[in-house]
Image (cartoon, helix red, strand yellow):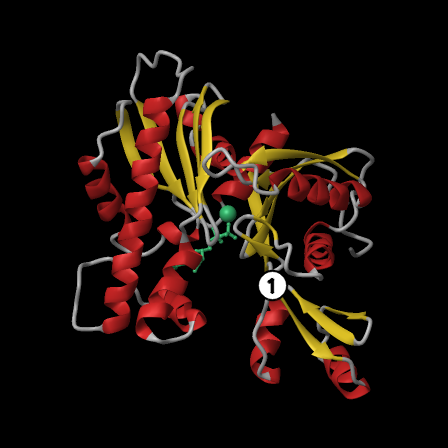
């Protein structure tokens, strides 16, 4: 930080996602976001490779006999060195198969937040909700991230991702309604009443599932499926294109699975408060971005009527930042 820049001592929001980590802070009355890919690559250590990384100002670290490049730089240099990027997280939590997982998340979080500028500076960070009641390593993940933040000097508090979406998007309905975040590993859902979570869960079919299934049936690489999905794909029915059709089929499966699980979860909830009014439902996360997602979601809703009345269904105006903004808003409360 330069000498003239004033230290930011206000609360912060952090979205610890499987594919991206996003930090949110307030600047005047606005919110500002910074994001880094939650990814890394490793190269065998050599003086030449290290001096190249240094010359390019790359975010790297030496770990034993390897060079570890983390964050956005990983994707940039994957092409240069012809290696695949890896992810420290899988299905919403630290990946137990990745020995570098914790260190990479620590580096990326450190790069985004820096050290706390004031003692006890607050940060709320997103965590996934259980899938089908199974804890699935969430607690270990949560406490690991909390430790990273505590070591940076923050007072850290977890918030379930679906609830963060409610905070970020449903202020106008007094934080009552359904917040959904469809990311890469999971779709996270929370039904909240007056900011109190009543039902939260996650489903393990989301963007990565679409990529890997489409790759399986087209014989292509999942990374190529993802690029096509993000750049040109729209949900507008089947066509003559194999990849388009594969993406469509598995996108529809993700949507149907999400809506069915939502209906079942609300139907079987034992302590659902009496909702006199209808409530809004908002969709966020990178996987809701293709054109036609909303229409396909509505079709699935019509086929699986929810046991609560919905006043509106909408896609968040800035789906990639909803969770981080919501975590920030919760931290500001
Ligand atoms: N424009 C887009 N169209 C379709 N999918 C997208 C787009 N942008 C991102 N995605 C997908 O969204 C997922 C990442 O969403 P994000 O909310 O950033 O995830 P996470 O919380 O898992 O880090 C990935 O599966 C990615 O391929
Ligand atoms: Mg997310």
266 up-or-down from 327: above or below? above
The residue nearer to you, when weighing 193 against 140, is 140
Instruction: Tell me: 54 left or right of 333.
Output: right
Instruction: Tell me: 111 left or right of 285.
Output: right
Q: Is residue 176 visible?
A: yes
Pointer 1 residue: 39
Question: Could you say where residue 317 lies in the image, as x and y percent from the top left?
Answer: 39, 45
52 up-or-down from 198: above or below? below
Name the residue at 61% across, 55% down.
95
Question: Could you say where residue 220 lies in the image, as x and y percent from the top left?
Answer: 37, 76
Instruction: Tell me: 325 left or right of 248.
Output: right
Quadrant housing residue 117:
top right
Instruction: Tell me: 193 left or right of 64.
Output: left
The residue nearer to you, when weighing 155 against 242, is 242
258 up-or-down from 245: above or below? above
How many marks do you count on the picture? 1
Please tell me whether mark 1 sits on a helix, a strand or a loop: loop
Quadrant housing residue 118:
top right
Q: Is residue 234 visible?
A: no
Question: Could you say where residue 191 lies in the image, as x and y percent from the top left?
Answer: 42, 27
Quarter the C terminus occupies:
top right
């Amino acid at each position: 930080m330069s000498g003239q820049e004033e230290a930011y001592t206000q609360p912060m929001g952090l979205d610890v996602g499987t594919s991206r980590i996003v930090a949110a802070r307030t600047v005047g009355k606005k919110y500002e976001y910074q994001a880094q890919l939650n990814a890394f690559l490793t190269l065998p250590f050599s003086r030449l490779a290290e001096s190249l990384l240094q010359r390019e100002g790359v975010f790297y670290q030496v770990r034993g006999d390897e060079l570890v490049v983390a964050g956005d730089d990983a994707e940039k240099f994957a092409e240069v060195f012809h290696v695949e990027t890896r992810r420290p997280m899988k299905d919403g939590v630290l990946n137990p198969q990745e020995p570098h997982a914790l260190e990479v998340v620590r580096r990326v979080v450190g790069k985004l937040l820096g050290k706390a500028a004031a003692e006890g500076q607050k940060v709320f960070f997103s965590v996934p909700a259980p899938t089908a009641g199974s804890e699935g390593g969430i607690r270990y993940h949560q406490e690991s991230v909390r430790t990273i933040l505590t070591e940076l000097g923050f007072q850290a508090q977890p918030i379930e991702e679906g609830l963060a979406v409610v905070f970020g998007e449903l202020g106008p309905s007094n934080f009552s309604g359904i917040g959904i975040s469809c990311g890469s590993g999971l779709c996270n859902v929370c039904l909240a009443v007056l900011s109190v979570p009543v039902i939260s869960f996650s489903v393990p079919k989301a963007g990565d599932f679409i990529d890997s299934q489409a790759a399986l049936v087209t014989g292509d690489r999942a990374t190529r499926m993802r690029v096509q999905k993000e750049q040109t794909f729209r949900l507008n029915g089947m066509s003559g294109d194999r990849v388009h059709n594969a993406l469509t089929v598995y996108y529809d499966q993700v949507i149907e699975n999400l809506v069915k699980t939502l209906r079942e979860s609300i139907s079987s909830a034992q302590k659902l408060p009496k909702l006199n009014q209808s409530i809004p439902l908002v969709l966020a996360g990178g996987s809701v971005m293709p054109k036609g997602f909303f229409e396909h979601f509505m079709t699935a809703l019509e086929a699986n009527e929810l046991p609560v009345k919905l006043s509106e269904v909408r896609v968040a105006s800035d789906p990639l930042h909803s969770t981080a903004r919501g975590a920030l808003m919760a931290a500001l409360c």
